[in-house]
Image (spheres, rainbow, N blue to C red):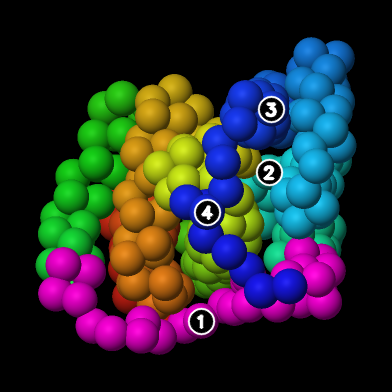
Amino acid sequence: MSATRGGDWPATPGRLAALAAFAAAAVLLVSAERWLPGGLAWVVALACVWRDRDAAFRRRLGVLLGLVALLAAAPIQTDLSARNFLHLGAFFLVAVVAPALILSRTDPGLLDFRLLPRRPRWRDAVYVLVSIPLVWGVIGLYFFHWNPELPTHWWMPAAPDRGWTWRLIAGINAVGIWDELFFVNTVYAILRSVYPRRLANLGQAVLYTAVLNDMAFTGWGPLLVFAFAVTQGAMYEGSRSLFWVLIVHLIVDFFLVAAILHHYYGSLPTRLIL
């Protein structure tokens, strides 16, 4: 069965309830780690999905609920040790690969992991350029004024160390790439196939925010991450490719790494990296 667009599906009360319960389960299980209310929300979402008459809807939302359960069990943290890289990386790898393998057989074309846009759009390039000073300003306020303790969520040695610096760079950029492969190219793409684009974008943004809040982005973080996730979903909707969303996320990661290193060492000396 080929993928359809969310606008072709009626937004019935049962399907809206399933999306609301899915979002609640994501926040309660992944971010808040409230197992009882989160588990109840997850069961409500599953019941709403199970009662739906359309097999494709049940299958696609069932995959997403499985992903919420997977992320609730994942050791989401900013530990830069090799052990955590492998442990968390295994969960993140399954979260991207498993839906692709399952849905490639039943819903071909739903997840295509397309890198380059089908047609260039000036608005995407303009957004990338605007994002540079915007991200610089927001991260500066967030890290050094609103939540000055935030950089300590990434442990670094007291003395500059090239190995730890490269581990920080690799870890943050790897997670950033995974964010777009998972939240936008997987979660949003699945939700977009059964819901109108605005509802689908809000749904993926909730899960995006829940995971990053659990990882490190506390305080004002959920508001900032949610806004960022919505803009990334909108950009992906327009280009239907990963190119622009990855470029913007890597810009964010550059300033994120710089802010963390500045907090620990006061500058970003070249000798620390080369």
Categorize mark 2 by other alpha carbons within 10 Å: few (<14), some (14-19), many (20+): some
Residue bounds of the magenta highlight: 97-124
Nearest the viewer among 27 and 251 is: 27
Taking the spot 83% from the left edge, 18% from the top edge, the residue there is 40
The span from disc 4 to disc 3 (Cα, nearest Å) is: 16 Å
Residue 249, percent from left and from top: 39, 62
The amino acid type found where label 3 is placed reads Gly
Taking the spot 47% from the left edge, 39% from the top edge, the residue there is 199
Disc with the residue nearer the chain's start (2 vs 3): 3
Residue that carries the numbered disc 4 in the rendered image:
8
Nearest the viewer among 28 and 87 is: 28
Residue that carries the numbered disc 2 in the rendered image:
77
The amino acid type found where label 2 is placed reads Gln
Taking the spot 16% from the left edge, 67% from the top edge, the residue there is 123
Residue 135, percent from left and from top: 25, 51
- Left or right, 77 with respect to 244, comes to right
Residue that carries the numbered disc 1 in the rendered image:
114
The span from disc 2 to disc 3 (Cα, nearest Å) is: 35 Å
The residue sitting at the top extreme is: 37
